[in-house]
Image (cartoon, rainbow, N blue to C red):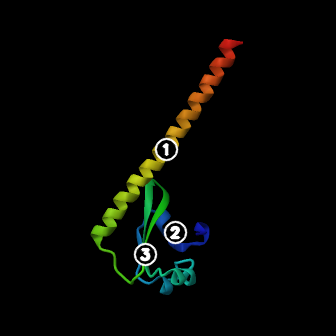
Amino acid sequence: MEVGKSRLDQEVLQGKTVTITDVSADDRFQYPKEAMAEGIVSLVVVPLNARDRVIGVLRVYSGESRVFSEEEMDFLQCIADLSGLALENARMYKALKRASELANEFNYRVFED
């Protein structure tokens, strides 16, 4: 996906959930021919939220034309929110680990020399 060229992703990155019943008939979907070749007919895209901002998207595809229920979309949003939280926690852990390594390296240089 080229997010910068995808109207669909631009909507979702603004915090909206988007459902499309027929990707071949919706001009927001970036690759309708490829979707048809892969058997993709319908989709729902929900934002991945972390710390009050959208950090990505979660896509669910269907091989048949369908309307996703409110319960399904609520479930997907919960999964997306948990995934966003997990990604943000992983980023913070990595940053904290790096900061700790730098502090240890600094202490070694200052106090060992």
Quick one: SS at disc 1? helix
Q: Which is more N-terminal, label 1 or label 3?
A: 3
Q: Residue furthest front?
A: 38
Residue 90, which numbered label?
Answer: 1
> Could you tell me if the residues under marks 1 and 2 are in contact, i.e. CB atoms within 8 Å?
no
Measure the C-alpha gap from mark 2 to mark 3: 12 Å
Q: Which amino acid type corresponds to the residue marked 1 in the rendered image? A: Ala
Report x, y in % for residue 54: 47, 57
Q: Residue furthest bottom?
A: 25
Q: Which is more N-terminal, label 2 or label 1?
A: 2
> Could you tell me if the residues under marks 2 and 3 are in contact, i.e. CB atoms within 8 Å?
no
Residue depicted at x 42% and y 66%:
16
Drawn side of residue 12 relative to residue 82, left or right:
right
Q: Residue furthest right?
A: 113
Neighbor class of circle 1 (other Cα within 10 Å; few <14, some 14-19, many 20+) is few
Residue hosting label 2: 9
Residue depicted at x 54% and y 73%:
7
Report x, y in % for residue 21: 40, 82
Q: Which is more N-terminal, label 3 or label 2?
A: 2
- Can the viewer see residue 52? no
Residue hosting label 3: 43
